Amino acid sequence: MKTNFDDVLNKVTQFLQGEAKTETVIGKEFKLGEFTCVPVIRVGLGFGYGGGEGGDTKQGHGEGSGAGAGIGVQPIGFLVTRGSEISFIPAQNSKGLTAAFEKVPDLIERYLDKQAN
């Protein structure tokens, strides 16, 4: 069985490119009143391939190959913009993402107050 390494690598690369994007983990950019929030992720990729063949006078000829790939995607936080201001809210510590979600009701209330006036 002959395996074309270039074909295998191409197929795995296409799969990883399709999966390694922000929308896969958190979602697309979204608006919250005046604020635009952009998810930020960390992506790790790995790929391995090996093959060989051999033989002897008693066992005959043999060959084999194998391939594997892995992907790790982790949310890091959000870039939050309002006008010309930009902030990063990390998701890794308990204050980051929790603090962002705790501010949501207040932000919505302020936004609605401005709309009413």
Image (tube, grey):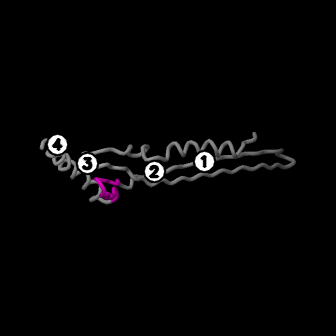
4 vs 1, front mark? 4
- Name the residue at 43% across, 47% down: 22
Q: Which residue is mark 1?
A: 68
* Residue extending farthest right: 57
Residue count near mark 1 (Cα–Cα under 10 Å), binned few <14, some 14–19, many ≥20: few
Residue underneath mark 4: 115
Q: Residue at x 72, y 49 (%)?
A: 51
User: Do tag 3 and tag 4 residues touch (Cβ < 8 Å)?
Assistant: no
Q: Nearer the N terminus, badge 1 or badge 3?
A: 3
Residue that numbered label 3 is attached to: 34
Amino acid residing under circle 2: Val
As drawn, 82 above or below 115: below
Name the kind of residue labelled 3 in the image: Glu
Q: What's the distance in space between the residues labelled 3 and 4, CA to CA?
A: 11 Å
Category of crowding for the residue at label 2, using alpha-carbon neighbours closer than 10 angstroms: few (below 14), some (14–19), many (at least 20): some
From mark 1 to mark 2, how far is it between C-alphas? 17 Å
Residue drawn at 50 percent across, 54 percent down = 44
Q: CA distance from mark 2 to mark 3?
A: 29 Å
